[in-house]
Amino acid sequence: MAKVNVELILENLSCANCAQKIEEKVARLSFAEDVSLNFVTKKISAKVDQKHHETFVEAVKKIVNEIEPEVSVLEAPKEKPMLNMGEISAVVISAIFFGAGLLTRKEGFALIFFLFSYLLSGKNVILSFFKNLRKFQVFDENFLMTAATLSAIFLKEYPEAVSVMLLYKIGQIFEDVALNKSRKTIQALKHLEIEYANLKIGNEIRKVNPKDVVPGDIVVVKPGERVPVDGTVVSGKSFLDTSAITGESKFFAAQPNDKVLAGSVVVDGFLEIKAQSFYKDSSLHRIIEIVENASANKSKTEKFITRFAKVYTPAVVALAIIFAILPPLLFDQPFKLWIYRAAVFLIISCPCSLVISVPLSYFASISKLSLKGILVKGSQFIDILASKIGSFLFDKTGTITNGVLSVEKIVPVEISQHEFLKILISIESLSNHPIAKSILKGIGKNSISFSSVQELKEHPGRGIEGIVDGKKVLIGTKEFLQESGVEINHSSEVSPELSYIFVSCDRKFCGYVALKDSLKDDVKKVLNDLKSFGAKIYLLTGDKKEAAEKIAKDLPIDGIYSELLPEEKVKVAEKIKLENKGLGYVVFVGDGTNDSPVLSVCDVGISFAGSASYLATTAADIVLLDERLSKIVDLIKDSRFTRKIVIQNIVLSLGIKFAVMFLGVLGVANLWEAVVADSGAMLLAVLNSLRVLKR
C-alpha cells in the first residue's frame, strides 16, 4: 500500500526539550517512517500507510498527552495572537501578590501573599511536574524549576522561591513572543499560497479552490492577482512580477505561448492561462514543500546538540545532587548552604537555549534563502557549504553558458529542406532538452506542419529517436548515429565554437544542425569568487574537446573533462572526490538535464529549476529558481554567516550556563540570578538567530 505523508500541528508547544522527547517516541512507532518534528513551525510529520493514518494520529495524541498535556494535536493550524493575555494576567496578579508580601510586616500575611504569588505564576509548571513525576520523566524544565523552587521553600527562602518562579514565567512570555515573531517572519513564504483561482467554464468565470484546477483548464488572472497554477498563456498580455518565486525584482513580459509559474503576480493586464499541472505539482507549492520539509535533513551540529542535550541535563542534575550531599557529609558543611547551591545548578541545567536556537538559525537561513530564489533541502547542506569546499564541478550548457543555443546552420543532405524541418519539428517538439528547445526556436519562423511520432525514446547525453511517417529517425551526436550503423560524411564540422546535431532517416544520414552558445555575463566573476574560497573549478561536458577548451580558455578553470556521457560524469565526480579526500567537499552545479546521477553522487548537488526536469530538481540538494550563477556565491556567504551565528549561540549559551554554575558553587550566584541568566541566554540566542533574516 502506498504511503502518505501525515502532518500534524502541536498547538501550545513551547518546550524544546519536550519536543525532542515527542519526536523520539513517535519515531519508535513501528508503522511510522521519516518522522520529523520542527519546533519552529510546531509541526510533526511522518510517512505511514493509508490504513494507519488514524492510528498514527491517535498514537501521536497519546504520546503528546504523556509528555506535554497542555499541547493540542491538530490537523490544521489555528491563528494565534502574538501575546497570551491569560498568561500575562496571571503574571501581573502574581507580581502584585509578591509585592504585597515584600511590603507587609506581618510574617503570616507575607507567607500567604507569597504562596498565592507562587501558585499563580507556577501553577502549570507545578502540575506538569507532578504529572511527569508519576511517569518518572524528571529531566525537563518543569521538574527542574519546581525542584529548585521547592528547595528554596524548604530552606524558608520564600521571597527567592517566588521571585524565581515569577522571573521564569516572565522569561517564558518573552521567549514565546520572540519565537512567535520568528515563526511569523520565517513562514512568510507560506502566505504566498494561492487562495483562489478564476476558472473559465464556457463564458462563465467561477472562483474556485486552486486545488480544483486540473491540467487543461483555463484560468483568468486579473491585475494584482497571482497565477494559481503553472501554465501557458493562451490570450492576453501583461507584465509579471516573479520576485516572490525567483527573488529577483524584475518584470517579465508575458504573452501568448509563454510559460508562467504559479505565484507570479499579474501587473497590468488580463491573462488567460491553460493549466499544465495540478496545484500540488506547481512550482510554488513545490517551493513551499521543500522549505517546510528541509528541517528533516538535520545538520551534524543539530544532531550533536540533540545528543548533547540528552547527556547535559542528567549530568548537571547529578552534579547538583553531589553538591547537595557530599560537602556536608565530607567536610561538615551546612546542608542548607549546599542545597541552595545545588538549586542554582538545577535552574541552569535546562538546555533549551541550545535546543531552540540552533535549529532556529538553520531554519531561518533556509527560509531567507528561499525568498532569494534559492531552495535548500536541509541544514546539512548549509553546514557543508560553510565548511571547506575542495572543488566545484560545472556542467557547460545552461550552466556556465546561457543554454539558449542559436541555430547557425540547417543543412539537409539528400532530402528537401521542408522534409528535413518537418522531421526535426516532429521529434524535438516532444523533448524538454535545451537543445531541442533551441532548434525549435531557430526554425519556429517557418510554418511547417509536423507528423505524429511513435516509439519515442530519449538517450540521455546522446540523442533521441522515434518513428516519423514510417521512418526510423535518429537525432543526436555523431557517435550516437554511428553506433546505429549510420555513415556520416561531414566535412563542415570544423568550428570549435559550434555544436552539431546530426539526423538520420532509416540509417541514412540526412543532414545536420549547427548551433552556437554564449557564456553567461557573470560567469567569470563568479568563478573567480569561488576560487577565492580556496576551491578548484572543473568543467564537465559532453561537448567535443576543442569546443570545451574554446569556451573555457578565458575562464579560471583548473581542469576540463569533455565528451562525457551522464554515467561518465559520475565516474569523473567520484575520481575528483577521491583526489579531494581530506581537502574539502565536492559540489556539482548543473542545469539539471541528464545530470541526476552526478547530482546525487557529489557532496552537494545544485541545479537550476528553470531548465531542470522534475527528476533532476528532486535529485539536487539545492535548487536555484533562476539562471544567475551569482546566487551560488550568495549561498556560500549566507551559509558561512549562518554557521557563525550557530557557533555564537553555542558559545553564548554554554558560556553563560557554565559561568553561573561556577559562581553557584562559589556561592556568588543566587537563584534569581540563575533564572535571569537562563532566560537571558535563551532570549539572546533566539534574537541572535534572527540576525540571519536581517542579512
Image (cartoon, helix red, strand yellow):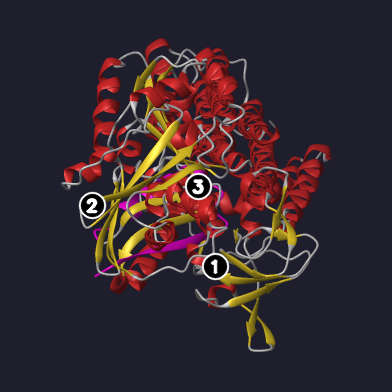
Q: Amino acid at mark 2?
A: Lys
What residue is pinned by disc 3?
Answer: 609
- Image quarter of residue 319: top left
| Residue 263 horizontal/vertical position (percent) | 64, 59
Disc nearest the viewer among 1 and 2: 2
Left or right: residue 192 compared with residue 420: right
Q: Residues within 10 Å of mark 3 (few under 14, many from 20)?
A: many
Q: Amino acid at mark 1?
A: Ala
**Secondary structure of residue under mark 1:** loop
Spatial CA distance of label 1 from label 2 is 62 Å
Residue 187 visible in the displayed image? yes
Binning the other alpha carbons within 10 Å of mark 1 as few (below 14), some (14 to 19) or many (20 upward) gives: few
Q: Which residues are magenta?
A: 1-30
Q: Quadrant of the N terminus?
A: bottom left
| Kind of element beneath mark 3 | loop
Judging depth in this view, the residue of 59 and 406 nearest the camera is 406
Asked which secondary structure carries label 2, the reply is strand
Q: Which residue is mark 1?
A: 76
Q: What kind of residue is marked 3?
A: Ala
Q: Earlier in the sequence, mark 3 or mark 2?
A: 2
Residue marked by disc 2: 508
Using the numbered discs, state the Cα–Cα distance from disc 1 to disc 3 in whole angstroms. Answer: 30 Å
In magenta segment, residue 26: yes
> Measured along the vertical axis of the image, is residue 597 above or below residue 547?
below
Q: Earlier in the sequence, mark 1 or mark 2?
A: 1
* Lateral position of residue 419 relative to residue 555, left or right: left
Quarter of the rendering containing residue 575: top left
Q: Is residue 275 left or right of residue 578?
A: right
| Location of residue 85 in the rendering, given as x and y in whole percent from the top left corner | 75, 57
Q: Residue at x 55, y 16 (%)?
A: 528
